[in-house]
Image (spheres, rainbow, N blue to C red):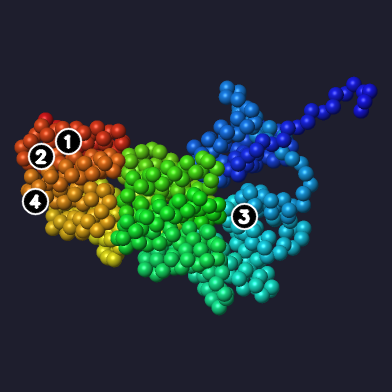
Amino acid sequence: MPGNNVPPPTPVPALPSLTRREREVLDELTRPLGGDTPFTEPASVKEIAGRLFVTQAAVKQHLLRLYDKFEIWEGEPRRRLKLANEAMRRRPHDHVHPLEAAREAFDRRDWATAAQLFATADSRDQLGPEDLERWGEAGIWSDRHEESAAARECAHAAYLERQDERGAGRVAIGLAYNAIVRCQFSLVAGWMNTARRLLGDLEESAEHADLAAISAILQIAEGETEAGLDSARAAHEIGGRTGNADAQAMGLVNQGHALARQGRIREGFDLLDEAMAFASSRQLGPMATGVVYCRTISACLDLWDFRRALEWTDEVDRREQGGEAGFPGDCMTHRAALRIVHGEWAEAEREAEFACVTGDLFDRNHVGAAIYEIGEIKLRTGDLDAAENAFRRANEMANPCQPGMALLMLARGDPEAASASIGAAVASVPNDALVRAHLLPAQVTIALAAGDVDAAAVAATDLDGIGERFGTAALRAAAASARGSVDVERGRSAQAVTELRSGVQLWTEVGAPYESALARVGLGQALVALEDRGGAAMELRAASAAFERLGAEPDLIRTNERLRQID
C-alpha cells in the first residue's frame, strides 16, 4: 500500500516460449515432486529419456536449449536442479477445470499430464465418449496401458449406446493397437473383427482408412505380403479421399515394406522414402509417425541395406532433437542392431538394454529382439553363459533365437548339435528368403566346422541366390564370403582368394568390421594354401587388430594362433 515501507512483490516471470518436446522434457524433469516444494533432486536424463521414449542424447540437447531460455548459464553448479526449481516457480497456478486442462494438454501432446487430468475430471463427472477416447490415447503414450484400454472400452460402449457405429469402430481399432503393443494377439483379432463388423456397411470414411492401415501391418507381419500390399494401397487411397493423413502415411510405408520383401527393391524403397518425406511434411499422430519410422528402418535391416538404415536412423535422431517424437523402444532396438554391424558393441549393448526397458513400458514386441542383440554381443565377446541366458530369454518372448543359439553350441564345441539346430531353423522358413538370409552364413560356418562341405555348399548357393535377387551390398558380401569359405575347404584356393577379397571389400564398404575381419581370416587361409605366407600374415594381422578393437576375444585368440603357425 502507498505509505508503507514494504516494497511491492517482484513479479514472477512467465515461462519462456517452449516447443512441445521442450515442454515434455520440463514436465518430466519436474515430475518427481510437483507442487511448490523446492526440488532436492529432479528426474535424471535417463529417467526422462525412458518416460518420453527418446534417446538420452536428445534429452541432453533439449536441456541445453532450456538452460538458455531460463538463463541458467554454463558453469553454474547443479544446473538441472536450478532449472527444475525455476520451472516450478514460474509455472502458472490457475484454476482451470481439469477437463478443460486435460483437453489443452492433450492438444499439445503432453500425454502424462493429459491422462492424469482426464482421470481427475472423470472422478468428478462422467466423461463423454470423445473425452474417454482422448483419455485412452493419452494413456497409451504415457505408460498407463490398463487405464488406456479401460477408457477406450468405456468409449466403445458409450458410442454403441449412442448408436454411433463409426465412433465405436474407430475405438475398436484403437483397442487393437492397445493389444498389439502388449502382445495380446487374441484380443487383437477380436477387436479387428469388431471394427470390420461395425464399419463394414457404412459409407467410406477416415475410419475405413485406419482399418486398412492396421490390417496391412498385421498381414505383412504374418508374411501375407500380397494381402498386406492390397490393404496398404487401400489405406493410402481411402486416406487421401477422406483426409486421413495418418492412414495415407501408413499406407505408403507398408506398400514399400511389402514390395521390398517381394524383391521389388527399387519400387519398395521409393515408397519408403516417400513415406518418410510425407511424415516429415505433416503433423501426423504419434502412432503413424512411429509406424513410418519403424517400418522404414525395419525394411532396411531386413534387406541388409545398412547404409540406408543408418541414414534414416540419423534422421529420426535429428527430428527427436528438434522436438518431434520418435517411437519408444523400437527405434532404440534398430539403432542397437546397426551399432552391432558397425562394430560399436558397447554402445549397442547400452542401447539394447535401454530398449528393453522402454519397450517393456510401451511395445513388448521389440523387447525380445533387443535381448537377442545383447546375446549376440555376449557371444562375440566370449561370455557364453550370458549369451545363452539372453538367447533363452529372447526365445521365451517368442523372438527367434537363431542363429545365435546354434553358434553358441558351436562355440561350446558341439558342431553336430549346432548343425541340427541351424538346420531346423532354416527348414522352418522355406518361403521367406530374407529370414533364411540371416541364418545361412551361420549354417555355412557350422557345416564347415562339422566337416560337411556339401551342406555348406548348398547353404552358400542359397545365400548367393538371395544376394542376386535382392542385390544389397551386405547380402552380396555375405554370399561372396560364404562361397570363398567353401572354396577354401574344397582346395580351390585361387577362386577362394577372389571371392574372399570381394567379401572383404564389400564388408568394408558396408562398414561392418567384424564380418570384414572374418572374411580376412578365410582369405589368409586361402593365401597360405597358395604359399603366399606374407600376404596371409598381412590379412591375419589386419583381422587380429580388428578383433582386438572390437573385443572379440575368441576370434582374436584363434587368429593369433594362425599367425603363430605361419610366422
Classify mark 2: residues with Cα within 10 Å, few (<14), some (14-19) or many (20+): many
For badge 2, the amino acid type reads: Leu
Q: Nearer the viewer, mark 1 or mark 4?
A: 1
Distance of label 4 from label 3 (alpha carbons): 62 Å
Residue lying furthest front in this view?
241
Residue lying furthest bottom in this view?
201
Q: Is residue 566 visible?
A: no
Which quadrant of the figure contains the N terminus? top right
For badge 1, the amino acid type reads: Glu
Please give the residue where the numbered disc 3 appears in the rendered image.
Answer: 138
Q: Earlier in the sequence, mark 4 or mark 3?
A: 3
Q: Nearer the viewer, mark 1 or mark 3?
A: 3
Query: Element under label 3?
Result: helix
- Work out whether 419 lies above or below 518: below
Query: Element under label 2?
Result: helix
Please give the residue where the numbered disc 1 appears in the rendered image.
Answer: 539
Q: Earlier in the sequence, mark 2 or mark 4?
A: 4
Residue lying furthest left in this view?
531
Q: Residue at x 60, y 41 (%)?
A: 19
Q: Nearer the viewer, residue 297 or 360?
A: 297
Q: Which mark is residue 7?
A: none
Please give the residue where the numbered disc 4 appears in the rendered image.
Answer: 490
Q: Nearer the viewer, mark 2 or mark 3?
A: 3
Q: Which mark is residue 527?
A: 2
Task: Tell me whether the residue at label 2 lies in contact with that at label 1, contact meaning CB atoms closer than 8 angstroms.
Answer: yes
Query: Element under label 1?
Result: helix
Q: Earlier in the sequence, mark 1 or mark 4?
A: 4
